[in-house]
Image (cartoon, grey):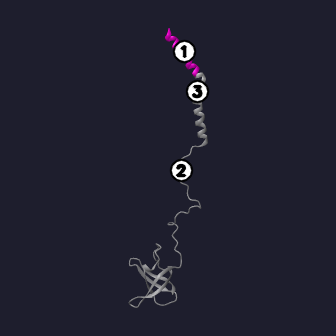
Amino acid sequence: MRFDGTLESWYAERGHGMMKPEQGGDALFVHVSAFPMDGQPPREGERLSFEVVSRSDGSKQAVRVHRLQEYKLPSQLRPARMGSRPPRPIARRRTSPLTWTVLVLLLLGVGATVWSPASHAIAGKDQAQAQSSSRR
């Protein structure tokens, strides 16, 4: 049968304490192993639900303890709230369309200058003059 009570005293260095049942009666011994393994230490004044068993010396002990109030972490220890969407992975930097347009125009300009018919004509005249002067 389950009972409700309050943790009256707790000796953390020893790992045990005393629990006072709400229904009245003597305080009960409670060991740290009776508490849930939820990572939260027992706190004096905490409301708990428990079962009672008799020990070998005839005294009673609280076992199978459950917390009646959910323990809330202080706001400084809570993880930061995240939106409903997970964070985006860090991606490499993308090149904007304007940058690509400028690069293409620059390449076309350089290509038009180097391979224009006028530059071939000038180069052809230079070669013809060089050949004619070498014949003389």
Q: Are marks 1 and 2 in contact (CB under 8 Å)?
A: no
Q: Quadrant of residue 102?
A: top right
Q: Quadrant of residue 31?
A: bottom left
Q: Residues within 10 Å of mark 3 (few under 14, many from 20)?
A: few
39 is within the stretch colored magenta: no
- Ranked by sequence position, the earlier of labels 2 and 3 is 2
- Ranked by sequence position, the earlier of labels 1 and 3 is 3
Left or right of residue 39, residue 98 in this image: right
For the question of whether residue 105 can be seen, the reply is yes
Residue 56: x percent and y percent? Answer: 39, 89
Number of the label disc, if any, that sits on residue 128: 1
Q: CA distance from mark 1 to mark 3?
A: 21 Å
Q: Residues within 10 Å of mark 1 (few under 14, many from 20)?
A: few
Rendered residue at 52%/64% (across/down): 79
Please state the extent of the stretch shown in magenta in the rendering: 120-136
Look at the numbered disc 2 and give the secondary structure of its residue: loop
For the question of whether residue 46 can be seen, the reply is no
Look at the numbered disc 1 and give the secondary structure of its residue: helix
Residue 84: x percent and y percent? Answer: 59, 61
- Ranked by sequence position, the earlier of labels 1 and 2 is 2
Rendered residue at 59%/32% (across/down): 108
Q: CA distance from mark 1 to mark 2?
A: 57 Å
Residue, disc 3 = 113
Query: Which one is nearer the viewer's eye here, 98 or 18?
Result: 98
- Principal secondary structure, stretch drawn in magenta: helix
Query: Which one is nearer the viewer's eye here, 58 or 14?
Result: 58
The amino acid beneath tag 2 is Ala
Q: Residues within 10 Å of mark 2 (few under 14, many from 20)?
A: few
